């Protein structure tokens, strides 16, 4: 009798296991991707239409950590698909002694987002996006001419270069502010991003952007 009863019990166990799997799949599919498990990407909007393709915060570019280990330098323009918060973290790894210390940069960014949330009570990812939009110069001047006669000519800046330059200015401003200072790098970066997002001239990036645009205006 025992041989007959065993096959009857087995399908029930299989059915229970399949139900558990279905529940697990449903729960897994419903989870929302949040940066550091806290900050949502759903309500983020890029308010400058020209930069929508170059600030990667939506859809596939939403990540749990700003550390995807992607090969973004292999091909031209591929870094445009790198999540924007990860690009900010990469910009912090400058000046020799910080080269390659990405985990340190990620930790700084994590603390920065916490501080921004305390200062503004907004989603810090939105503040970062706004700061990048406000910090990128729209016009620059280049050297034109040859044979000893060189003059400056004003040129428009591409959207991709605007994003690149904004990230560079924001990271440089934060680094200079925290150098030989009691303030931590995270505090300085948070302050820089908040000021830039507001368009305040207290921000290093906004001051530099205005200076670049002023020089290029005089060279039109």
Image (spheres, helix red, strand yellow):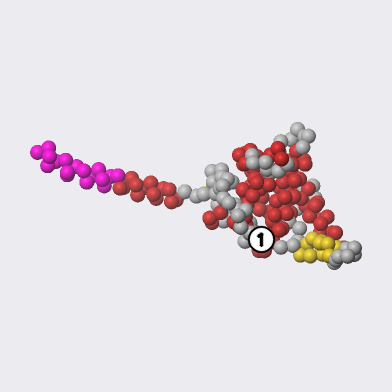
Looking at the image, residue 25 sits to the left or right of residue 100; the answer is left
Q: In the depicted view, which residue is nearer to us: 126 or 136?
A: 136
Q: Which residue lies furthest to the right in this view?
A: 148
| Horizontal side of residue 9 vs 118, given as left or right | left
Tell me how many marks there are: 1
Residue at position x 85%, y 63% in the image: 152
Find disc 1 in the rendering and name its residue.
51
Q: Pick whichever, 7 or 140, lies toward us.
A: 140
Side (left or right) of 103 relative to 146: left
Q: Is mark 1 on a helix, strand or loop?
A: helix
Q: Main secondary structure of the magenta part?
A: helix
Residue for point 56% across, 54% down: 61
For the N terminus, the image quarter is top left
User: Is residue 39 part of the magenta span, yes or no?
Assistant: no
- Given the current orientation, which residue lies at the most extreme top position? 182
Residue drawn at 75 percent across, 33 percent down: 182
Residue segment shown in magenta = 1-17
Quadrant of the image occupied by residue 95: top right
Asked if residue 1 shows in the view, the reply is: yes
Q: Which quadrant would the C terminus be assigned to in this image?
A: bottom right
**In x, y percent, where is residue 175?**
74, 41
Tell me where residue 153 sits by quadrant.
bottom right
Residue at image location 43% in from the left, 51% down from the top: 29
- Locate residue 104, reporting x and y percent: 63, 38
Residue 11 magenta: yes
Q: In this view, does 89 lie above or below 134?
A: above
Q: Which residue lies furthest to the left in this view?
A: 1
Mark 1, other Cα within 10 Å: few <14 / some 14–19 / many ≥20: some
């Amino acid at each position: 009798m025992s041989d007959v009863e065993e096959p009857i019990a087995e399908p029930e166990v299989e059915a229970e296991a399949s139900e558990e799997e279905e529940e697990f799949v449903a729960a897994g599919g419903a989870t929302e991707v949040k940066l550091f498990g806290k900050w949502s990407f759903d309500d983020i909007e890029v308010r400058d239409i020209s930069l929508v393709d170059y600030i990667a915060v939506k859809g596939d570019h939403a990540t749990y950590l700003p550390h995807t280990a992607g090969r973004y330098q292999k091909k031209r323009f591929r870094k445009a698909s790198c999540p924007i918060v990860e690009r900010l973290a990469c910009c912090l790894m400058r000046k020799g002694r910080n080269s390659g210390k990405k985990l340190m940069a990620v930790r700084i960014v994590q603390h920065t987002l916490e501080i921004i949330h305390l200062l503004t009570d907004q989603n810090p990812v939105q503040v970062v996006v706004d700061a990048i939009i406000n910090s990128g110069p729209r016009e620059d001047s280049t050297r034109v001419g040859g044979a000893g006669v060189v003059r400056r000519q004003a040129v428009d800046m591409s959207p991709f270069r605007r994003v690149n330059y904004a990230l560079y200015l924001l990271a440089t401003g934060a680094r200079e502010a925290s150098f030989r200072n009691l303030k931590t790098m995270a505090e300085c970066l948070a302050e820089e991003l908040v000021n830039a997002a507001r368009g305040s001239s207290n921000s290093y990036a906004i001051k530099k952007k205005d200076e670049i645009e002023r020089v290029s205006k005089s060279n039109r």
